[in-house]
Amino acid sequence: MKETTAIAHPNFALVKYWGKKDSNQNRPAMSSISITVDSMQSKTKIFKNTQSNCHRLFINGMEETDLSKILPSLFYLSEISKSDDYLIIQSENNFPTSSGLASSASGIASFVTAYGAHYELNLGLRDRIEACILGSGSAPRSLIGGFVLMDHNNNYSCTQILQKADWPVDVLICIASEETKEISSRQGMEISKRTSPLYQDWLGANEKHISLALKAIKEKDMGRLEKVTEENCNFMHEVMKTSKPSIIYMNDVTHSCVAEIENLRASGHKLFYTIDAGPQVKIICDPKSTNTIKDTITHGTDVIDIIHAGLGESPRIIDED
Ligand code: PMV
């Protein structure tokens, strides 16, 4: 039986999206800038379900009962393929799932890539963006490698700003907890949009943050990228905190990582952090400082693990035979 497998990498936003314009279509209310990383990946295999009349999704070998993220993408794609096949979808992440490590972005992007190849659809980027966005607002960014801009003023076009070879920064993902988050980003964003007194200011800051980050990336200016990335991250977490109920994803380990990052910076290392809807801290750094940063964070905090990555590529089909 025909099986198709694709790999896609997660992406982490430097200028984040938190809030949707349209919840039904899952449209972000703002633009975002991200980096796609290499050593973390989702590997998704699809094939026809010949045993029952339903789609079945397995993540890391466990069957999922909630298919609400994947079905809108699948329905979009089956309109194009004209296929009424029921599918078995088997997805595996080589990193903790649903804990603020963008597993839904890489999961959806790998699924969309596998589906396009399985039905030989030869999909253009526009259709792949549309299929991804229905599953996760940040997933389209995983379709592109390196530094990526997703522009909400231009129908969520995704473009590469720089590729790995242009600016080969390192990324250290500090695992502060492997627990699944209690409030999904989807729920959290809705709560913030409805209740945070800072939400309008947050929306208003997006354009400025995007233009500052774009300039800093194009000029490979670590100092200015640090400033805008951390400001954007801390603003998002203030929006979360001032929501009702208050949403707090950071824990004590997160805070001790940030303190160590500030110490390292004070002693001359080039690095900065960002934190998403989970307690993990992502450090972007000059590769010359990677070993010192790893040692300092390992010894100075209670992190569970540090994943070392560089900038990654766009998704690809793999041959598993
Ligand atoms: O749409 P989601 O669930 O992938 O939301 C992503 C939310 C953040 O990771 C916090 C920010 C971002 O832009 O990636």
Image (spheres, rainbow, N blue to C red):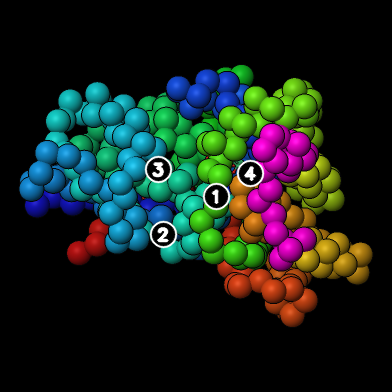
Q: Is residue 172 left or right of residue 109?
A: right
Tag on residue 260? none
Callout 1: helix, strand or loop?
A: loop
Q: Quadrant of residue 304?
A: bottom right
Q: As shown in the figure, which amino acid type bears the numbered disc 2?
A: Asn
Q: Which residue bears the numbered disc 4?
A: 13
**Mark 1 vs 2, N-terminal side:** 2
Q: CA distance from mark 4 to mark 3?
A: 17 Å
Q: Which residue bears the numbered disc 1?
A: 182
Tag on residue 93? 2
Q: CA distance from mark 2 to mark 3?
A: 12 Å
Q: Which residue bears the numbered disc 3?
A: 108
Callout 4: helix, strand or loop?
A: strand
| Circle 2 crowding by C-alpha within 10 Å: few under 14, some 14–19, many from 20 | many
Callout 2: helix, strand or loop?
A: strand
Q: Quadrant of residue 150?
A: top right
Q: Is residue 266 left or right of residue 247?
A: right
**Mark 1 vs 3, N-terminal side:** 3
